[in-house]
């Protein structure tokens, strides 16, 4: 009955309620008109039965309607398992991590492996953002998946996640080190979301830890769990609207107080004025130090983006900021002696065929990225020769 068009669903719901009211009214009128031929008890029972039938019918229709709206606007409240089935889940230290409910995510790593690293096999740990996680691709088509095929005698742990800044990636690395992971090589890929922290400023206030998410969703965790326990979809929808507003913005877009005019000239000018690369530089320095503390070789990268897709604001400012953070990565590599894969300077990709939509890679582009990284890793370590 209800589809993906919410406006159409509202019309169907209201029409169904109206039909229930009309049906109830007609039935009650018939019962009343026949009062002379029936006893009082029969009339009372008929009225009660008719009323209960149409109330239950209206409730069933409302439940179906509420379920459809929950799925589209409040997906975290739609089913008892919905929260755990989101692609990422809250985490008290790393802010959020990829959900292990998904078949291609194991122990919060996306492809591979389900088991812990094999003893004696080199471990390559990928720390970073959506350019590693790559939710738009099948796991085997991501850069991590292709790198794993090129280096079958190594274990590739993909710890990337969408929305991660360098700070997120660093916190996630520390979390995994505390859990006992000891990678041989750690590769950091970041910059885009670090710039978005400034692009998505909140009236001139920047939170470097949240990028798209100005308020962590952890404060909602307990309340959300309590609401999901309510069996009635209608009541869950009502409470969701009361807590988060009709659009469910606080839960389902994972955004809080991001200005809707962040792409306007004044907002972009503010972002450029606020831009400060020093936190990124400090985070990379901490990343290098943490890797060396546990005997891992740190590898920094520069960020490659599709220049053809960055000509208008605010993407022009994205590119402006990314270029500056790329310079920071080069300086940190020189100052610390860390290894550097300069993707921005050396990677050659064709827009549309290799890379699309700012910095989202296609299968061909990932093949080139994986080959470049594999060659670099073989040159700096004794991992293995890449597969031809």
Image: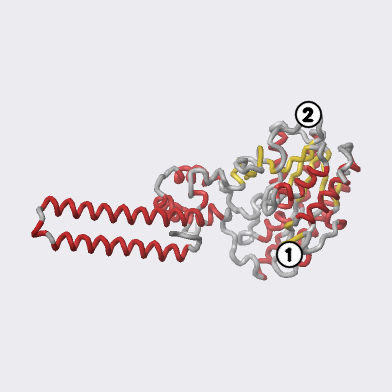
Residue 136, how many percent across, how many down? Answer: 68, 54
The residue carrying pointer 2 sits among few (fewer than 14), some (14 to 19) or many (20 or more) residues within 10 Å by Cα, namely few
Nearer the observer, 275 or 9 = 9
x 20%, y 60%: residue: 28
Residue 302, how many percent across, how many down? Answer: 81, 53
x 39%, y 51%: residue: 235
Query: From the viewer's perspective, is 202 left or right of 276?
Result: left
Query: From the viewer's perspective, is 113 left or right of 296?
Result: left
x 63%, y 42%: residue: 103
Residue 11, how many percent across, how many down? Answer: 41, 66
The quadrant of the picture occupied by the N terminus is bottom left
x 50%, y 56%: residue: 73
Q: Earlier in the sequence, mark 2 or mark 1?
A: 2
Task: State which mark lies toward you, 2 or 1.
Answer: 2
> Which residue is labeled 2 in the image?
119
> Which residue is labeled 1 in the image?
317
Q: Farthest residue toward the top?
A: 119
Residue 230, how many percent across, how many down? Answer: 41, 45
């Amino acid at each position: 009955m209800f589809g993906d068009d919410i406006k159409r669903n509202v019309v169907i719901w209201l029409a169904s309620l109206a039909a229930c009211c009309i049906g109830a009214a007609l039935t009650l009128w018939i019962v009343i008109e026949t009062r002379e031929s029936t006893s009082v008890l029969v009339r009372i029972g008929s009225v009660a039965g008719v009323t209960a039938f149409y109330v239950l019918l209206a409730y069933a229709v409302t439940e179906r309607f509420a379920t459809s709206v929950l799925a589209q606007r409040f997906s975290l409240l739609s089913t008892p398992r919905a929260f755990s089935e989101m692609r990422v889940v809250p985490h008290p230290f790393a802010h959020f991590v990829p959900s292990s409910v998904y078949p291609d995510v194991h122990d919060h790593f996306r492809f591979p492996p389900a088991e812990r690293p094999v003893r004696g096999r080199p471990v390559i740990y990928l720390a970073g953002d959506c350019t590693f996680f790559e939710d738009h691709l099948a796991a085997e088509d991501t850069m991590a998946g292709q790198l794993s095929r090129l280096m079958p005698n190594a274990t590739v742990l993909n710890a990337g996640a969408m929305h991660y800044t360098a700070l997120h990636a660093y916190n996630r690395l520390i979390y995994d080190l505390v859990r006992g992971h000891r990678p041989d090589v750690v590769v950091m890929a970041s910059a885009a979301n670090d710039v978005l922290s400034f692009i998505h400023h909140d009236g001139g206030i920047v939170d470097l830890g949240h990028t798209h998410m100005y308020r962590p969703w952890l404060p909602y965790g307990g309340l959300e769990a309590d609401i999901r326990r309510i069996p009635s979809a209608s009541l869950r929808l009502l409470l969701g609207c009361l807590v988060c507003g009709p659009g469910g913005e606080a839960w389902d877009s994972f955004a809080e107080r991001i200005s809707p005019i962040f792409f306007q000239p004044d907002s972009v000018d503010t972002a450029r004025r606020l831009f400060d690369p020093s936190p990124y530089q400090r985070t990379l320095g901490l990343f290098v130090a943490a890797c060396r503390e546990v005997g891992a070789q740190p590898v920094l990268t520069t960020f490659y983006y599709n220049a053809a897709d960055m000509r208008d604001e605010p993407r022009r400012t994205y590119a402006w900021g990314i270029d500056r953070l790329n310079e920071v990565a080069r300086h940190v590599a020189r100052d610390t002696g860390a290894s550097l894969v300069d993707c921005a300077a050396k990677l050659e990709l064709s827009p549309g065929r290799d890379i699309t939509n700012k910095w989202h890679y296609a299968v061909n582009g990932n093949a080139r990225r994986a080959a470049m990284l594999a060659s670099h890793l073989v040159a700096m370590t004794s991992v293995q020769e890449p597969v031809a």
